[in-house]
Image (cartoon, grey):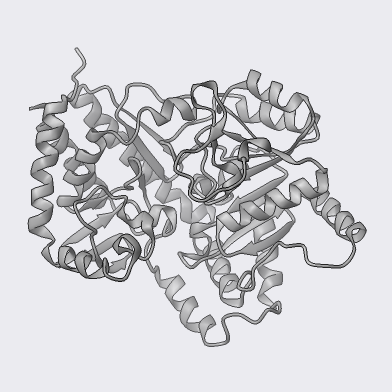
Amino acid sequence: MRASVSEKAVGKLLSREKQVFFQRNQKSQALSEQAAQNWLRGVPLHWMVDWGTPFNLFINKAEGVDLTDADGNCYIDFCLGDTGAMFGHSPKAIAQTLASAGSTGLTTMLPSEIAVEVGALLEDRFGLPFWQITATASDANRAVLRWCRAITGRKNILVFNHCYHGCVDDTFVTADGGKVKMVEGLVGEPRDLTAHTRVIEFNDVSALEKALAAGDIACVLAEPVMTNVGMVLPKPGFLETLRDLTRKTGTLLIFDETHTLSSGPGGYAREHAIAPDGLVFGKPIAGGIPAAAYGFSADVANRIRSFLASNGEGRSGIGTTLSGSRIQLALIKTVLTQFMTREAFAPVIELARRLERGIADVIIKHGVDWHVTRVGTRVEFMCCPNPPSNGYEASKLIHKPVDQAVHQFLLNRGVVITPFHNMMLVCPSTTETHVAKLVATLDECLGELLN
C-alpha cells in the first residue's frame, strides 16, 4: 500500500513552518523592508524572491557549503547558487586566484599569455578545439545561435519543450497542449518567436525526424539532460539518434552543459562519448565569477572563418567588452586544473551516490510515490512515482505545495536546496555529515507529513 501526502497535511505543515521562519529571521525581515525602498521587488536580481519564503533571507557569509544569515542562523547549502558555486563558495584556490590575478589587471581588451594555456585546457577537457569566452551562458547561447544561423543560411532553430537556456528570447517557446506559442510571462518581447523557433518534446524520435526533415533547422540547442524542470533523462539511444539525425540533415547540434557539467570533468557529452558540433557552459566555470564559454568543432570553426571572409569587414554583433578578460581566464584555469579533473570529481560523485541512496531509502521507508535521480554530482527528487520522459510531463509535477512545504521545513532546520525544484548539488566541501543531515531532515519531514 503506497502512502500519499494529503493536501491538509501539506497546508498545516507549511503554515506552521512559515511562522517558524518569521521567528527565526527577524533581522532578514527588517532588511527586506528596507531593501524594498531601492531594489525592484526588494532584491538586486528579481529571481531572488523565488524561494517561496514569506520574505527574503539575507545571507552574510558563504564559505564552502556553509551559509550564515543576517540573524546568525547557519545552513548547509546544497543549492550552491543554483550551480553557480558548484565547487563550493569561495574555495581557497579561487580566492587565491582572485587575489593574485586581480593585482595584475582585470580586463584589457587584449589577450594575455594565459589565453593560450586555457584554450588548450578547454580542448583537453571537452574535446572541441575552438573557443570563445562570454560573461554568461545566456550570452554564449545567443552567440551560438547567431553563428549557426549565419553559417548554415537557415533561420530556424529547434529546442525541446520546457527547456531552459538562460535569458535567450528565441528559446521561450512552448508546445503544451500541442499548440506552439510563446511562453506566458515573457516580458516585453515584440516579435513572434514561433516564426523561427520549432519546439518538440524531449525523447520523441518521431517528432525529431519530422522537425528536421525539411532541412531548414540551423541547429538543435539542447541540454543532454533536461535540468530546469526537474530532471528529465534521455531514453537509451535518444542522444545518439539526435546526433545521427542532425548530421544527416545538415543541422548543427549544440549542447548547453551549464548544469550537466556535474556529470564529470568533461561534462555529459564527454562522459557518454557523444560528439556535438558545439558546447555552451557558464555558471561554475570561473568559480562563481561571471564567465561562460562556447566551443566549436574544427569543421564549424572553418565554416565561421569562411563566412567572415566572404562577409567583408565590419562588426559581427557578437561579443561584449568584458568577455575574455584576464581575470575570467585566470579563474577558468583554476577551475579546470583544480576542480574539473577525474581525481577531484571521483569522491564527490561517490558522495552524491550516497545522497541518492539515502533519499531513496527515505522514500522506501515511508512508502511514498516519489523518486530520486542523479547525474554526476547533481541529485533531484520529485514527488511523483515515475521519472518524467519529457518537459511537458515534468512541468505538471513540479512547483507543487508539497515541494514548498518540504523546502520550508528543510530551510528552517538549516538545510538549503534549490528553490525552483528539488535539486541538490554535492561539492568538494560537502561531507558525509552534511549528507546525513539532509537525509535525516527529509526523513523527519516526511514523517510529519504522513502522521
The residue shown at (30%, 54%) is 49
Q: How many marks?
A: 0
Does the image show residue 256? no
Q: Nearer the viewer, residue 353 or 230?
A: 230
Eyeballing the image, is 116 above or below 110?
Answer: above
User: Based on the displayed image, in which of its 4 quarters is residue 76 positioned?
Assistant: bottom left
Establish if 3 lies above or below 173: above
Q: Identify the residue at horizontal 26%, vertical 63% (top origin).
A: 67
| Residue 423 visible in image | yes
Task: Measuring from the top left, give residue 177's x and y in whole percent.
Answer: 49, 22
- Residue nearer the viewer, 24 or 352: 24
Is 378 on the left or on the right of 248, as rendered?
left
Residue at image location 77% in from the left, 62% down from the top? 316
Seen in the image, is 260 located left or right of residue 356?
A: right
Residue extending farthest top: 1
Q: Position of residue 32 (x, y in %)?
A: 22, 64
